[in-house]
Image (cartoon, rainbow, N blue to C red):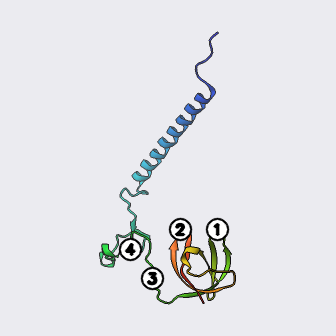
Amino acid sequence: MAKSQQTFNKLEREKNKAKKREEKRKKMQARKEARERGDLKQDEFVYVDHLGNFTDTPPDPAEKEEISLESINLGAAKNQGNDEKLQGKVTFYDNEKGFGFIKNLLTQESYFFHFSECKDTLDVGNKVEFDTVRGEKGLNAVKINKL
């Protein structure tokens, strides 16, 4: 006697497809009946206003904000021209690996630094003056001077 070519999984997939087709047909029929009764409007639109909110009415073109192409920045943010240097204290320094962290005295934020950014040799506890630059993982201390 030969085995059936249809496996259990095949039968289940076919049943699921037939069930989905039937559900879709029922939904289409329900929409058609609602449209005939007048419950469903054919041409409903959703608009987005100038603030990004959904509305039923079209947005007012007078409220549209014009943006110039020159004002769009596609790269990393430039340093804000901060002329005054920050002051901090070296909280960690690994002399063998050549990196450490400086804690800002005012904000208590920590900044990573590499020994190549410092002219003097540093130790834990030294007070320093530095600038910041955006790095891969956050702000880095650069142009470090011992106080």
Q: Nearer the viewer, residue 146 or 109?
A: 146
Judged by depth in the image, the label closer to the viewer, 1 or 2, is: 1
Q: How far is the residue under mark 2 from the one under mark 3? A: 18 Å
Q: Say few, some or many: other residues with alpha carbon within 10 Å of mark 1 (under 14 / 14 to 19 / 20 or more).
A: few
- Quadrant housing residue 108: bottom right
Q: Image quarter for residue 44?
A: bottom left
Marks 2 and 3 in Cβ contact (< 8 Å): no
Going by the image, does 5 lie left or right of 95? Answer: left
- In the rendered image, which residue does mark 1 sit on? 97
20 in relation to 62, above or below:
above
**Quadrant holding the N terminus:** top right
Question: Where residue 137 sits: x, y (%)?
Answer: 56, 69
Where is residue 75? Give x, y as percent.
41, 69
Query: Closer to the camera: disc 4 or disc 1?
Result: 1
First reached walking from the N terminus: tag 3 or tag 1 = 3
Q: Earlier in the sequence, mark 1 or mark 2?
A: 1
Give the x, y percent position of residue 8: 63, 27
Three-letter code for the amino acid on which mark 3 is drawn: Gln
* Tag 4: amino acid: His
Distance from disc 4 to disc 3, alpha carbons, whole Å, reads 29 Å
Judging depth in this view, the residue of 54 and 100 nearest the camera is: 100
Circle nearer the N terminus (2, 4): 4
Look at the numbered disc 1 and give the secondary structure of its residue.
Answer: loop
From the image, tell me which residue sits under label 2.
Answer: 136
Single out the mark in the foreground, 4 or 3.
Answer: 3
Judging by the rendered image, the residue that carries numbered circle 4 is 50
| Image quarter of the C terminus | bottom right
- Number of residues whose C-alpha sits closer than 10 Å to that of mark 4, classed few (under 14), some (14–19) or many (20 or more): some
CB atoms at circles 2 and 4 under 8 Å apart?
no
Q: Are marks 4 and 1 in contact (CB under 8 Å)?
A: no
User: How far apart in space, not on screen, are marks 2 and 4 (Cα)?
Assistant: 34 Å
Q: Which residue is mark 3?
A: 80
